[in-house]
Image: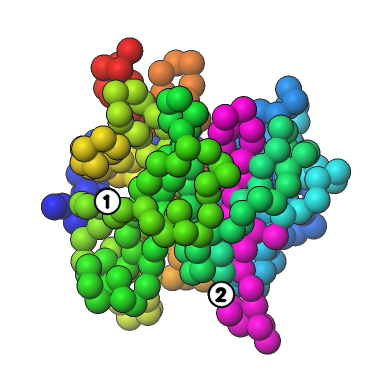
Amino acid sequence: MKTIQQLRQIYEQIKVPKDAALLEFEGVEGKDVYNCSIPFESGGKTYILGRVEKRNEWASSVSKLFEKKDDGKWHKVNEFDPLPIEDPFCVQINGEIVVGGTHVLKERGLVKTYYGYFYRGKDIFSLRYFTTGPEYMKDIRLVQLPEGRIGVFSRPRSDEIKEKYGSESLVGFTVLNSLDELDSDSINAAKYIDGLFCKDEWGGVNQAFYLGDGLVGAIGHQGYRYFNEAGEHAVYLNMAYVFNINTRELLEKKVIGQRSDYPESSYKVPGLKDCAFTSGIVFRKDGRAELYSGLGDTSEGKIVIENPFRVEMAMAQ
């Protein structure tokens, strides 16, 4: 199994990202917006959910809704009540919009615990909370499967996992029959996927697509640490995976983006200057894809890349 550093070296020899840009947000009064959902349509308008936080605060986020206007900027929607989650995602499941993210509980200013919170509704303005994920688990993601079934990616991370498996986190996958089955127990029951992480690596799935013939394409993030005279640095890379849900084989794993592909911007602390926390991709009519990513825990960027699942999608047609 290749390490993430080796996969990064391969990517740097072939990468051709284009049209890099930072997203501009209005109505946040100087606060940062980052680690967003991908853009999505609801009621004929284009929206994005973004994590909003003061630069000098940690784990004190809410997720707000922004609408893309004719000026190309994302304007805060005042009619939308902020959600008490960070790192939001939005996906269509069986005719409903499902929104999720990490809800953090603090005590005396320190993080006490966190859970995944999930909301559903016929559109973005009719969301209602419906379930909670396992304690201490972020980056739970859903994917629509044939016949109304739902694929669920989990992401357990703990000292016990690192001691047993070497990596700092794992990713599991399970299939449910409906959203009504989504809860802490069903997510915890997801069986682990082999081959995602090497020693001291971590990561998770941020978005997934059913490609056909039992194949799921996943867009995710993968990280590792390095140390130098300036201290500890966390590297987050944009990833793409292809997973066979029938055989449970990981068929492909590759880097599709890194922090240096995006425009320069600030970072929350120096140790996060090489952090690109993946939001996901939007397929384009020209066959390529827009890749969105949080940057340095302060901003959101996008680049244009080749469709990472083009071969699998063509074979499934």
Majority SS type along the magenta span: strand
Q: Position of residue 225 (x, y in %)?
A: 32, 69
Name the image quarter holding residue 307.
top left
Q: Work out whether residue 39 or residue 317 is closer to the camera in this orientation and state it.
A: 317
Q: Amino acid at mark 2?
A: Thr
Q: Residues within 10 Å of mark 2 (few under 14, many from 20)?
A: few
Residue 113 image label? 2
Per the rendered image, the range of residues in magenta is 84-113
Q: Residue at x 30, y 71 (%)?
A: 161
Q: Tag 1's secondary structure?
A: loop
Q: Is residue 137 above or below residue 83?
A: below
View extreme (right): residue: 79
Q: Which mark is residue 46?
A: none
User: Is 243 positioned to the left or the right of 112 in the image?
Assistant: left
Residue under numbered circle 1: 193
Magenta residue check for 155: no
Q: Residue furthest left?
A: 1
